[in-house]
Amino acid sequence: MTLKRLVFPILLCGILGVTIAQVARTQQGQVAAPAQRERTAEPRIYNTVKQKLAEGKQVVCATVSAAEPEAYCAIANSGFDCTWIEMQHSTLTYDQTAHLISSCKGAKAIPMVRVPDATDGDIQKATDLGALGIIVPMVDTVEKAQAAVKYAKYPPIGRRSQGGGQHSRIWGSDYRRTANDNIMVVAMIENPAGVDIADRIAAVPGVDVVFAASTDLGSFSGFPPTGPDRKGNPQYEALVTRIHDSVLSAKKYLGGPLNWKDRPGFTFFQGPTIGAMVNAGAPIVLGTAATHGRRAGAPVE
């Protein structure tokens, strides 16, 4: 009897120990499963421009230079894929730009901002106010392209800090976790120095689009797009071809003015200003055949 009394408690303790261990492992698995699912889940993509480009489609941004929310909303919901909010060649402030974007939350066009330069202040203000595209002018060094990515992306990719702003109110409470998958960087090549290293600019991780700035390429190079015979200038076209080949070889997206929409390889376009569209559309509304003013598809970079 004494032996039985000793064996039974020992067996009972052993059974309880095994049971508790099994329950603990099950609970750990139940806790770990959601975390594992979160780590392996596909990122939430709300940047429709990024989606369309990935699908091989072309996208067009309307150029916005005025602090008029009503006009901005009309453009942002008119069929354009994105808005190119112009802060390099306009007097728009960051407060005004923030108001444009917040006044038209939910618009079909994705807000993008051409910042004055690739500085941490300019880029982090633009991203904090809700821009999903950072367009950087005059990229003619690899370091400038790298700086654009660094300040547009949160760690571990970049060095964007967590500040205030309206980004989460526009894009959701999971913004911090999803921003790096949705924010795009567009590097503009506008001069021969940029053309010379177009392959290196395009190779920078985090640069999504390289934009051939058609007007300034002619201005800075001294080779106008068209020669005296009104045909394409071969020296100018050689610059464009070099950008084209470098960008596509790096498997990045290639940008240019809207009137280059039929050029092979180009998929990201800067469209006209609001004023140019009104100027082009007024004769249609008035029923007149005459056209006047700037063509709606003319380069505006």
Image (cartoon, rainbow, N blue to C red):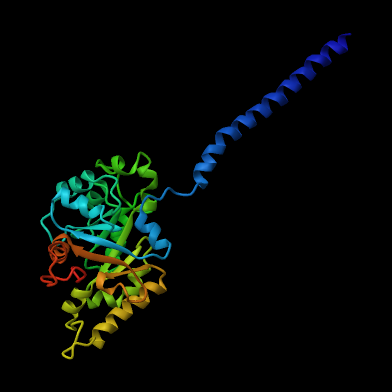
**x, y percent for residue 127:** 27, 50
Farthest residue to the bottom: give it: 229
Taking the spot 35% from the left edge, 63% from the top edge, the residue there is: 208
Residue nearest the viewer, comparing 54 with 271: 271
Question: Where residue 49 sits: x, y (%)?
Answer: 35, 58
For the N terminus, the image quarter is top right
Vertical order, 164 against 90 (above or below): above
* 161 sits left or right of 15 in the view: left
Quadrant of res 222: bottom left
> In this view of the protein, can residue 140 be seen by the observer?
no
User: At 30% across and 53% down in the image, what residue appears?
Assistant: 132
In depth, the one of 45 and 183 nearer the eye is 45
Quadrant, the C terminus? bottom left
Q: Give percent across and percent down for residue 291.
A: 13, 72
- Outermost residue on the top side: it is 1
Q: Which residue occupies 40% across, 50% down? A: 45
Q: Locate residue 135: give its quadrant.
A: bottom left
Outermost residue toward the right in this view:
1
Q: Is residue 301 above or below residue 113?
A: below
Give the residue drawn at x 19%, y 52%. 72
